[in-house]
Amino acid sequence: MLRGLRGRKTTTTANPSPDEGDRIAAIGLVVLATCLFSCLDATAKYLVNYSNLPVGQIVWARFLAQFLGMAFLIPALGILSLRALFTTNALWLQITRSIFLALTTIFNFVAFIYLQLDQTISIMFLAPLTVALVAGPLLGEWVGWRRFIAILVGFVGIVIVVRPGLGFLHLGGAVSSFSSMIALSVFILLTRLLAMRDPALVTLFYSLMVGVVVGTPYAWLYGVWPQDVFTWCLLLAMGLFGGLGHYFFILAYERAPASYLSPFLYAQIIGMVGLGYLVFGNLPDGFTVIGSLIVVSSGLYLYHREHLKRKAIVEKAKV
């Protein structure tokens, strides 16, 4: 499906080995992708709070703009034909996964009405821990006691961020953000099931196409025409940020394994905090900082244990 995506590599002794060079490039691509996703969320939050557009229309516009952006990038992605994008070995699984991505986006955009960017991303970082917890009964990927404790510690971190019952976070915003996190967890689980069945670009194509198809009736019936050029630019920017972000992710995961890159996804919290301050004048409070650090630390430890487990399996297979 892909051709010519990797740049020329040097093999001189003064430079990193090709494998090391690929991994360094992959880290840079993942960090760049997380920055773009932070820009996407900041743009969406601005539109949700300061434009005259309903949330459903903004969600639809996000998928449409990214879908058109992918169509524009088709030559760069090396896709031989449009038919190749429609070819899937698991149609209903693709559709179900795409619906959960749409639900993730809808709930997240609703949460933007009430919560700061740093608060929403802290809750969303609970998704990998949730996936690890439920992957046992659903996928047979059981966690050991160390990783189970790490998951529980991550949940404690979210309790610190949300402080349920104390009224520090808007209840509706917190519920929407948690709903988005749960939908994202299901989305990740379905992505694992699809990983060995369809190419990544096919899965990305269905994610965007289903979002456009599902959202079009709502946009047609309840959509509001944007009032100014600036709003149009923001709508298009969402597609640019999302499309390039996913494109860089694809390039990154071609160069390095997911277990190596996953910890760097947490770089997104830096972008969210920075944009939250620059665009909205929001700074995280002490509880959000402490809670998010606990969640991030738990996630990093979880990835570390999974890396050790995979390494032990590989070494055992060599013997």
Image (cartoon, rainbow, N blue to C red):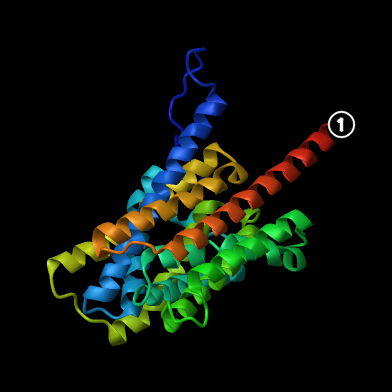
Q: Residue type at mark 1? A: Val
The reply, left or right, for residue 195 in relation to residue 160 is right
Q: Which residue is found at the position 60% from the left and 67% from the top?
A: 156
Q: Residue furthest bottom?
A: 221
| Placement of 68 over or under 174, stated as above or below | above
The front one of 252 and 272 is: 272
Total numbered circles? 1
Q: Is residue 286 above or below residue 1?
A: below
Question: Residue 311: where, in percent of width, then height?
Answer: 74, 39
- Picture quadrant where residue 105 is located: bottom left
Residue sitting nearer the eye, 57 or 201: 57
| Residue 52 placement, left or right of 240 | left
What residue is drawn where x is 39% and y is 77%? Answer: 110
Q: Residue at the spot x=35%, y=83% of the render?
A: 218
Q: Which residue is mark 1?
A: 319
Q: Is residue 89 visible?
A: no
Which quarter of the picture shows residue 149? bottom right
For the residue pair 271 and 67, the one nearer the viewer reads as: 271
- The answer to whether one can see residue 52 in this image is yes
Quadrant of the frame with the C terminus: top right
Residue 212: x and y, percent? Answer: 39, 71
Residue at point 53% right, 24% down? 18
**Residue 287 rendering spot, x and y as whole percentages:** 46, 65
